[in-house]
Image: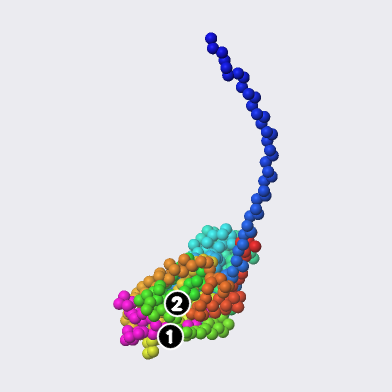
Amino acid sequence: MSADMTGPAPPAPPVPPAQPAPPARPAPPAPAVRSEPPALAPDFQALRACWHPVGFSSQFADGPARVVLLGEPIVIWRDSAGAPHALRDLCIHRGTALSLGRVVGDRLMCPYHGWQYGADGICRLIPQLADPTRIPGKARVSAYRCREAFGLIWVAMEPPRWELPDVPELDSSKWITVPCGPFTWNADASRQLENFTDFGHFPWVHPGLLGDPERPVVPDYSVATDGHVLSYDIVRPEAPNSDDFPVFANQAVQTPERRSRYRLQLPYTIVLRLGWGGEAGMVYFFASQPISEDRCAGYVLIARNYDPDQPPEVLQEFERTIFEQDRRVVESQRPERVPFDLAAEMHLTFDAVAINYRTAMRDQGLARRLSPRPGAI
């Protein structure tokens, strides 16, 4: 018989009392949301008092048509004499688009209930009334100034501050005019205008068409500002005519130079006169339609006094190529809208046009300061 030699187990050591957890440190405050000072951008309210293109005349030959200007839908229609008119594209009765209607004599008829509006926006006929001519005073829509010039329809939503530029070549029988566009971009109209007159990009975006990468230096030039008009001349190298696009009068020049005289009229119009030292000349008329804050449409009219037998399709295809090369670059720019604060982007001496344009837009009250983001300080 064996004896149990293990004996009783020793008592367990006492468990020390739990120590209280150290107080939690307060979380550091969230970093303040900071932003740059609010930038200046185009002021759509101020731009209402300017003429803007909304389409080529030929686009409005077949009845009422809807356009958008400064973010507002507008209907363009012609009366019995062919004169163009512009109304807000919204019937006061039930909000129907008047552009879906039709012209009856000198009135625009709503497609929904047949209400008829005059060129002044006042409703002249409500067929549902026993006396359809007893019109309530509220029965009217906004009417805008509308005119036809240079083969384009123009609209000013408030009394325009300035007249359109004078371009006699576009009305001369000695010059052949070719319309090009519209070129619709997802970009601010100021971006499209600045690109049109940016001298530094030609060799890189349009090599062999508008510029020569072997001669990228931008010649010296200066900009004179007179109120809402900027004037500047430049003589710069360009690429010789290509076989695909023989559009310029520089065939006999060994190292072609283009003499360019620019007149930029605020907010979005440029008249460019080109010469190569002889009698041959070309005029570019460019205007951009501010459809919305980040969308625009450019219209180009090209007049020249040489090559009368060249088909217009040659120039039109050339411009389509140029504008498409530009579009992909400009649509990538950030911010999408031109920052009219000069400190927001870097400028060099060859950017004198952009510097003076942005300054003039501010000075003429066509740029506004954006509101800061919520929570920004």
- The type of colouring in the image is rainbow
| Residue at the image position 57 percent from the left and 58 percent from the top | 94
Q: Determine contact: label 1, label 2, CB under 8 Å.
A: no
Q: Nearer the viewer, mark 1 or mark 2?
A: 2
| Residue at the image position 64 percent from the left and 65 percent from the top | 137
Residue that numbered label 2 is attached to: 200
Q: Is residue 96 above or below residue 355?
A: above
Q: Residues within 10 Å of mark 2 (few under 14, many from 20)?
A: some
Q: Residue furthest top?
A: 1
The quadrant of the rendering that contains the C terminus is bottom right
Q: Give SS at disc 2.
A: loop
Tell me the distance, in whole angstroms, between the alpha carbons under discs 1 and 2.
13 Å
Q: Is residue 4 above or below residue 49?
A: above
Q: Is 274 on the left-hand or right-hand side of 345?
A: left
Task: Name the residue type under label 2.
Answer: Gly
Q: Residues within 10 Å of mark 1 (few under 14, many from 20)?
A: some
Residue that numbered label 1 is attached to: 235
Magenta-drawn stretch contains 253 = yes
Where is residue 358 shown, x and y percent of the image? Answer: 55, 76
Magenta-drawn stretch contains 324 = no
Q: Quadrant of residue 172?
A: bottom left
Where is residue 229 shown, x and y percent of the image? Answer: 54, 82
Answer yes or no: is residue 144 visible: no
Q: Give SS at disc 1.
A: strand
| Residue at the image position 43 percent from the left and 71 percent from the top | 326
Identify which residue, 360 or 68, lies in the foreground: 360
Highlighted magenta segment, given as a residue range:
236-265
Q: Quadrant of residue 215?
A: bottom left
Q: Earlier in the sequence, mark 1 or mark 2?
A: 2
Identify which residue, 225 or 293, lies in the foreground: 225
Task: Name the residue type under label 1.
Answer: Val
